[in-house]
Image (tube, rainbow, N blue to C red):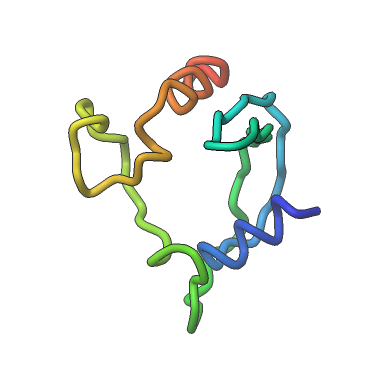
Amino acid sequence: MAAVREVWEETGARIHSLEYIGQYEVQAKAETVIKNIYFAEVATLERQANYFETKGPVLRKQLPVKIKQDSAYSFVMKDDVLQLSMERLNL
């Protein structure tokens, strides 16, 4: 499955379980892109020589309260999808 491969390539995580949450739309310049949302439980985390599109995993006990204003986080973490997904999972 593509989601499992992406997690491995970008974090070095081996997935124990994967739960589909839903989809959302991203308005690109010329088209609308549909993105799937998953919640995964990680079995193991292994150091990678290359993390492809990321700088690798960062483990936190909790997300910053003001994550939308935090320049250390990607724009991907700053839309309402993250908060709505966390609420859906009761996290």
Where residue 63 sits, quadrant-wise, is top left
- Left or right: 44, with 73 as reference point: right
Where residue 20 sits, quadrant-wise, is top right
Query: Which residue is nearer to you in this view: 31 or 33?
Result: 31
- Left or right: 7, with 73 as reference point: right
Residue 13 in the image: x percent, y percent?
A: 57, 62
Query: Which residue is nearer to you in this view: 11 or 30?
Result: 30
Work out whether 4 lies above or below 65.
below
Where residue 55 sits, quadrant-wise, is bottom left
Residue drawn 75% across the image and 54% down it:
2
Work out whether 59 lies above or below 31.
below
Query: Which residue is nearer to you in this view: 84 or 32?
Result: 32
Residue 69 in the image: x percent, y percent?
A: 18, 32
Work out whether 27 lies above or below 77.
above
Residue 36 in the image: x percent, y percent?
A: 68, 34
Give the residue furthest to the right. 1
Residue 71 in the image: x percent, y percent?
A: 19, 44
Residue drawn 64% across the image and 31% down it:
32
- Left or right: 63, with 29 as reference point: left
Residue drawn 71% across the image and 34% down it:
19
